[in-house]
Every structure is written in structure tokens, then in C-alpha cells.
Image (tube, rainbow, N blue to C red):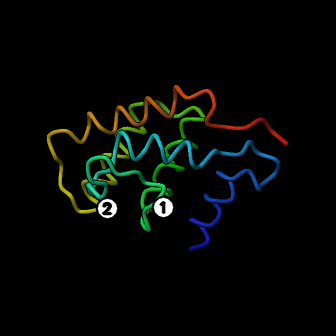
Amino acid sequence: MFYRFALILKAQGSVMGLPKLKLARLRDIGWSAWDPIGLLGDGESWDDQPFADEYDSYLMQAAGELRRGASLSDVVDFLVHIESEHMGMGVRHDAKERATKVAWMIQSDKELWTERN
């Protein structure tokens, strides 16, 4: 519990003046490129769903790791592991492709983080 709370605080910039993560922007990326459980139907948007925060902790960890210099490959492996083992979905044929896409989108988004306070 504490570890997850610390991750959320870090991602939100509440610890030691770290840059803040724009959570809505991260969710846009995650829901459009990943959604391993398949919660969103065609044409649906995450922002009006009760499960909007379903992937937040995984996406925040991926974003934080990339910001700290982790390789794209390591973050892809993390996301594939989360999907296949932690969520119990097994390794699906498109898991690595979706994980690569979301990790690349996170890494490439120059607007994802605010400036330091």
C-alpha cells in the first residue's frame, strides 16, 4: 500500500518538487494504445468510465521509469509482464506490439510532464 502511494505521489510531483505528470494525458495514451483487459468498447472514451484509473499505477510506473532513463525495451518487458502475469492474461500475440506502442508514445510525448515547481 505505501509503495503504491509513494509512486502516486512521485508521479504527481508531490515529493521533493519533482515535475508533475499530466495524468489525463497519460490515460489518453494508455487507453488508446494498451487496454490489455479490453474494457473500452469501440467509440468509448475512458474519461466517462468508472474504471478510468484501472491502469494508472502501471502507466505511471512506466512513465517514471522512462523519465529516469530506463530503456524502452525494459519498459516494454515490464508492461508485457504486467499484462501476462499480473493480470493473468497470458502472453497474447499482440502484447509486445501494444506495449511497445504505449511505451514509445509515453517516451515521445514532450507535454506529459510539467516543469519543476
102 w.r.t. 3: above or below: above
Q: Which mark is residue 53?
A: 1
> Of the residues shown, which amino acid type is indicated by label 1?
Asp
In the rendered image, residue 41, in percent from the top left (x then y), is placed at 27, 53
Label 1: how many residues lie within 10 Å, few (<14), some (14-19) or many (20+)?
A: some
Q: Nearer the viewer, mark 2 or mark 1?
A: 1
Which quadrant is the C terminus positioned in?
top right
The residue closer to the viewer here, 29 or 11, is 29
Q: Residue at x 43, y 56 (%)?
A: 55
Which residue does the numbered mark 2 point to in the structure image? Answer: 86
Q: Residue at x 77, y 35 (%)?
A: 115
39 w.r.t. 1: above or below: above
In the rendered image, residue 70, in percent from the top left (x then y), is placed at 52, 34
Image quadrant where residue 8 sits: bottom right
Q: Residue at x 28, y 51 (%)?
A: 36
| Number of marks drawn | 2
| SS at mark 2 in the image | helix
